Amino acid sequence: MIGSAATGIAAVSIMAALSILTSCIAASENRRLAVAQSSADRTATAGKRVWNFSQSNPLPQPLPDKIAASA
């Protein structure tokens, strides 16, 4: 009787460990797929992006006296 109870407990423990392992593998795979999809989205939209540097990163403008000197 004690042997069968121990076998049952061992079986349940193994099943629980396998369930946890399967969940971790599935979560890891989902994370990998999400990263791949995010990368694909960035690649797909990279060519359609409109860069506007005037607000976020203004280009240096020549000073008025240098413009007059070059003319």
Image (spheres, rainbow, N blue to C red):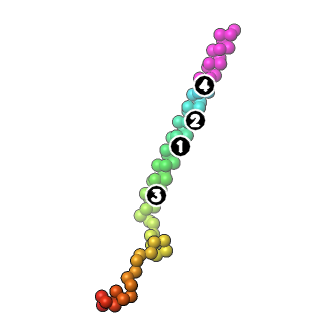
Q: Looking at the rendering, in which quadrant would you find the C terminus?
A: bottom left
Disc 4: CA contacts within 10 A as few (<14), some (14-19) or many (>=20): few
N-terminal-most mark, 2 or 1: 2
The kind of secondary structure element at disc 1 is helix
N-terminal-most mark, 3 or 1: 1
Check the image and report above or below for 13 versus 36.
above
Check the image and report above or below for 27 versus 41.
above
Residue 20 on image: x %, y %: 59, 32
Asked if the stretch drawn in magenta spans residue 3, the answer is yes
* Residue indicated by mark 1: 30
* Residue indicated by mark 4: 15
Magenta region's main secondary structure?
helix
Q: Nearer the viewer, residue 52 or 38?
A: 52
What's the CA distance linking mark 4 and mark 2?
Answer: 12 Å
What's the CA distance linking mark 3 and mark 2?
Answer: 29 Å
* Residue indicated by mark 2: 23
Residue 52 on image: x %, y %: 46, 72
Indicate the quadrant where residue 62 lies. bottom left
N-terminal-most mark, 4 or 3: 4
In the picture, the disc for residue 42 is 3
Indicate the quadrant where residue 7 lies. top right
What's the CA distance linking mark 3 and mark 1?
Answer: 18 Å
What's drawn in magenta, residue-wise?
Answer: 1-15
